[in-house]
Image: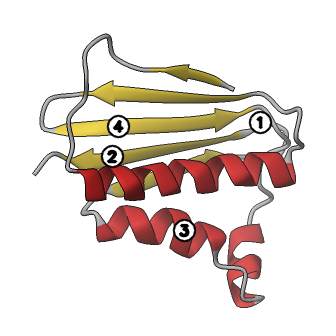
C-alpha cells in the first residue's frame, strides 16, 4: 500500500478522524478480501481548502455491474453502510469508479465544517 499525504498536517476533530479512518479501512479490507492480500493499493489525502478528499484505489479486477446491489440484497452491507453510509453521515460524498478489468477507485470528499 502506498499512502500520499500533504506536507503539512490536515486538522479535523477526532470523532471525524475516527470515522474517516474506518471508511478507509473498509475500502482497504475490500481490496484485501476481493483482490488479494498481496494486491497493490493507493491512498491519497488531499487538502482542498473547504474540504478534504481521500482517494483509495486498487488495480484489481473491478466490480461487475450490479454486484453491489446483489451484495446489499444478500445482506452484505459493507459498501452501503461501512463506506457510503459513514461518508454520508459525515456530510460527505462518495464516488465509485470501477469496471471489470480496470480496478476500483473510491473518491471520498468530506467538508471541513
Camera-nearest label, 1 or 2: 2
Give the Cα distance between marks 4 and 2: 4 Å
Question: Quarter of the image containing the N terminus?
Answer: top right
Determine crowd level at label 1: few under 14, some 14-19, many 20+ residues with C-alpha closer than 10 A.
Answer: some
Q: Secondary structure at mark 4?
A: strand
Residue at the spot of label 4: 53
Label located before the other in sequence (4 or 1) = 4
Residue 82: assigned label: 3
**x, y percent for residue 71:** 75, 78
Label located before the other in sequence (4 or 3) = 4
Residue 49: assigned label: none
Label located before the other in sequence (1 or 2) = 1
Label located before the other in sequence (3 or 1) = 3
Q: Secondary structure at mark 3?
A: helix
Residue at the spot of label 2: 109
Camera-nearest label, 4 or 1: 4
Residue 102: assigned label: 1
**x, y percent for residue 106:** 54, 45
66 lies above or below 99: below
30 lies above or below 89: above
- Count the labels in the image: 4
Label located before the other in sequence (3 or 2) = 3
Q: Secondary structure at mark 1?
A: loop
Give the Cα distance between marks 4 and 3: 17 Å
- Marks 1/2 in contact by CB < 8 Å: the verdict is no
Camera-nearest label, 4 or 3: 3
10 lies above or below 67: above
Amino acid at each position: 500500500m502506498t499512502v500520499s499525504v500533504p506536507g503539512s498536517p490536515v486538522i479535523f476533530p477526532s470523532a471525524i478522524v475516527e470515522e474517516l479512518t474506518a471508511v478507509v479501512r473498509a475500502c482497504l479490507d475490500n481490496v484485501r478480501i476481493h483482490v488479494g492480500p498481496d494486491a497493490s493499493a493507493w491512498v491519497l489525502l488531499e487538502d482542498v481548502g473547504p474540504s478534504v478528499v481521500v482517494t483509495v484505489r486498487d488495480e484489481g479486477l473491478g466490480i461487475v455491474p450490479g454486484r453491489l446491489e446483489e451484495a446489499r440484497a444478500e445482506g452484505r452491507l459493507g459498501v452501503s453502510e461501512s463506506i457510503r453510509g459513514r461518508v454520508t453521515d459525515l456530510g460527505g460524498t462518495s464516488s465509485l469508479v470501477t469496471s471489470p478489468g480496470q480496478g476500483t477507485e473510491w473518491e471520498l470528499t468530506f467538508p471541513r465544517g
